[in-house]
């Protein structure tokens, strides 16, 4: 598989996961890969219920899950470490 096809496949998988997490949380979720085993799910506004749904979905499968709301950006972040 060439570099372009691998990148396209990765983007496709990321988009599919964002779609699944959006359906789960009930808000539009964006995923940012921070490192090989760390990523962030974020969404606009403060929605504790949506953040808890994401946390609860992952908490039994990962090393750490933290939720943070940034008042300056008006964004909620769910930090996940695998």
Image (cartoon, rainbow, N blue to C red):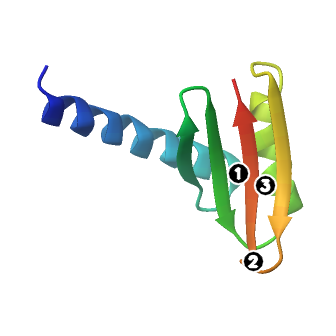
Q: Residue 3: where, in percent of width, then height?
A: 16, 30
Residue sitting at x 64%, y 49%: 41
Q: According to the image, label 2 marks what residue?
A: 74
Compared across the picture, whether 11 is left or right of 29 comes to left
Residue sitting at x 68%, y 57%: 26
User: Between disc 2 and disc 1, whose residue precedes?
Assistant: 1
The residue lying furthest to the left in this view is: 2
Q: According to the image, label 3 marks what residue?
A: 50
Q: Quadrant of residue 34?
A: top right
Q: How far is the residue under mark 2 from the one under mark 1?
A: 17 Å
Q: Is residue 45 above or below residue 54?
A: below
Q: Secondary structure at mark 2?
A: loop
Asked whether the beta carbons under mark 2 and mark 1 sit within 8 Å of each other, the answer is no
Q: Quadrant of residue 82?
A: top right
| Number of the label disc, if any, that sits on residue 33 | none
Asked whether the beta carbons under mark 3 and mark 1 sit within 8 Å of each other, the answer is yes
Q: According to the image, label 1 marks what residue?
A: 25
């Amino acid at each position: 598989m060439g570099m372009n096809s691998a990148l396209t496949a990765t983007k496709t998988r990321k988009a599919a996961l964002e779609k699944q997490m959006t359906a789960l949380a009930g808000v539009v979720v964006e995923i940012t890969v921070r490192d090989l085993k760390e990523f962030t799910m974020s969404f606009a506004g403060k929605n504790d219920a949506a953040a808890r749904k994401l946390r609860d979905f992952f908490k039994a499968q990962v090393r750490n899950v933290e939720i943070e709301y940034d008042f300056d950006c008006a964004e909620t972040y769910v930090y996940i470490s695998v």
